[in-house]
Image: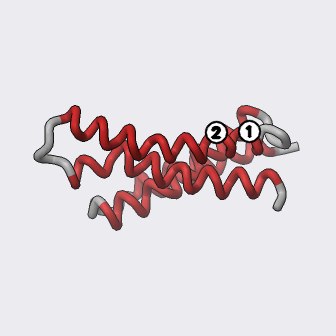
Amino acid sequence: MPPTLQSILLLTCSNIFMTFAWYAHLRNMAGSPWYIAAIASWGIALFEYLLQVPANRIGYQVLSLAQLKIMQEVIALAVFVPFSLLYMQQPFKLDFLWAGLCLVGAVYFMFRA
């Protein structure tokens, strides 16, 4: 599997864990003290780092640091929008689309030859 694809897959899985670590406690642990939510989030974030670190090391073999960062931001938004809509049951906003279009521009500038 090409390094770029490996990096994309690992970063996607990493972002799923990251999104749950950052936001799922708002729904699942709303009645718990913040420090309990923080400890649970740290436990989830461990899995994020176990995927994110190798993803960046693999990706850095063929991509620049800026390309890795933009790729991560695109993946983060691609994970966050379905999470927000489906898991957190937030309403769809056109701002998701506009943010995505801005990232398309960022991807263009980072990946053009």
Q: Which residue is mark 2?
A: 53
Query: Which residue is at the far left?
Result: 31
Query: Which residue is at the far bottom?
Result: 86
Measured along the vertical axis of the image, is residue 113 above or below residue 98? above
Q: Is residue 111 left or right of residue 81?
A: right
Q: Is residue 26 left or right of residue 41?
A: left
Q: Label 1 crowding class (10 Å Cα cut-off): few <14, some 14-19, many 20+? A: some
Q: Is residue 87 left or right of residue 51?
A: left
Foreground residue among 85 and 51: 51
Q: Residue at x 57, y 44 (%)?
A: 50
Foreground residue among 95 and 57: 57
The picture quadrant where one finds residue 49 is top right
- Residue 57 appears at what percent x and percent y? 74, 38
Identify the element where label 1 is drawn: helix
Q: Residue at x 39, y 60 (%)?
A: 83
Q: Amino acid at mark 2?
A: Val
Q: CA distance from mark 1 to mark 2?
A: 6 Å
Q: Label 2 crowding class (10 Å Cα cut-off): few <14, some 14-19, many 20+? A: some
Identify the element where label 2 is drawn: helix
Foreground residue among 39 and 34: 39
Q: Is residue 57 visible?
A: yes
Q: Is residue 106 visible?
A: no
The picture quadrant where one finds residue 1 is bottom right
Q: Residue at x 58, y 55 (%)?
A: 12
Query: Which residue is at the far right?
Result: 113
Q: Amino acid at mark 1?
A: Arg
Q: Are marks 1 and 2 in contact (CB under 8 Å)?
A: yes
Q: Residue at x 60, y 43 (%)?
A: 52
Which mark identifies residue 57? 1
- Residue 37 appears at what percent x and percent y? 25, 40
